[in-house]
Amino acid sequence: MTDTSNVNDSARPSRRGFITAAAATAAGAAVIAAPAVHAQAPIKLKFQSTWPNKDIFHEYAGDFVRYVNQMAGGRVELELLAAGAVVPAFQVLDAVSSGIIDGGHGVSAYWYGKNKAFSLFGTAPAFGWDADELLGWVRYGGGQQLYDELTQQILKLNVVGMLTGPMPTQPLGWFKAEITSPDQMKGMKYRTVGLGADVFKEMGVAVTIVAGGEIVPAMDRGLLEGAEFNNPSSDTVLGFPDVAKVYMVQSYHQALECFEVLFNKTKFESLPKDVQAIIR
């Protein structure tokens, strides 16, 4: 009698082989049936502030960048740059409009030289609103529409701008000696910006307008005799106490201010609608 057990066993597929083959077939079918999914590369945007890298305001710009990047879920990647990384601080608005950079963070007072109406959004006259009330007007009282008219229609800038981040009344600034009379400031080389610059010029002050990061070096070299920037925290970090020992707190030149976020209008409108909403 012939023994056929070995023949039958070798011809019969093993349980393990059957399971392996079935799994491979199922996997192949899944690959064929499932659509190809590719991770989309994030939209990268260069975002430069008007602030020195060590200034707390640059840190605020960093907070904005981080929140947008996180909330956009990786679809947008804003790269934060400090003042001067691509363009000087006072050129950020034009650089955003022309597309040299995609966005910027600063204050509208820096564009006062282009049109004095910018003082409405950052260096408004004293004895009026505080910064919270200003932002209420911007958001709910027609202020944003006036801002858009100024930037996009009157100045023909290709930008989308948003105002945010209220700031309190600003001190008169740092000096070599105590200021007890307005007459002491006549002829003084003094730094300020916005509407206050014109007010002080009318008083006979020799106003010099420079960006925040340039103030302390200018005072150290004697190019300025007095200067204001914003607040004790920022001023201290930038080194004002190293070049002037008198800090005059009370003033009327800048009763309120808020930050400004800028984006190139063409670039902004190309972003997904929900990302635009996140930015706003």
Image (cartoon, rainbow, N blue to C red):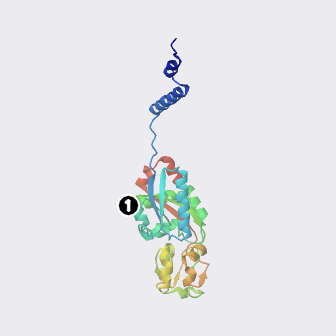
What residue is at 44 percent from the left and 55 percent from the top?
Answer: 44
Residue sitting farthest toward the top: 1
Amino acid at the residue labelled 1: Ser
The x and y percentages for residue 276 are 49, 51
Task: Establish if 270 lies above or below 202.
Answer: above
Q: Which residue is mark 1?
A: 98
Q: Is residue 167 left or right of residue 99?
A: right
The x and y percentages for residue 133 are 60, 62
Q: Is residue 41 left or right of residue 138?
A: left
Task: Establish if 139 lies above or below 178.
Answer: above
Q: Is residue 118 left or right of residue 256?
A: left
Residue sitting farthest toward the front: 1
What residue is at 53 percent from the left and 86 percent from the top?
Answer: 185
Q: Give residue 184's quadrant in the image.
A: bottom right
The x and y percentages for residue 275 are 50, 50
What residue is at 58 percent from the left and 82 percent from the top?
Answer: 241
The x and y percentages for residue 152 are 42, 58
Q: Is residue 202 visible?
A: no
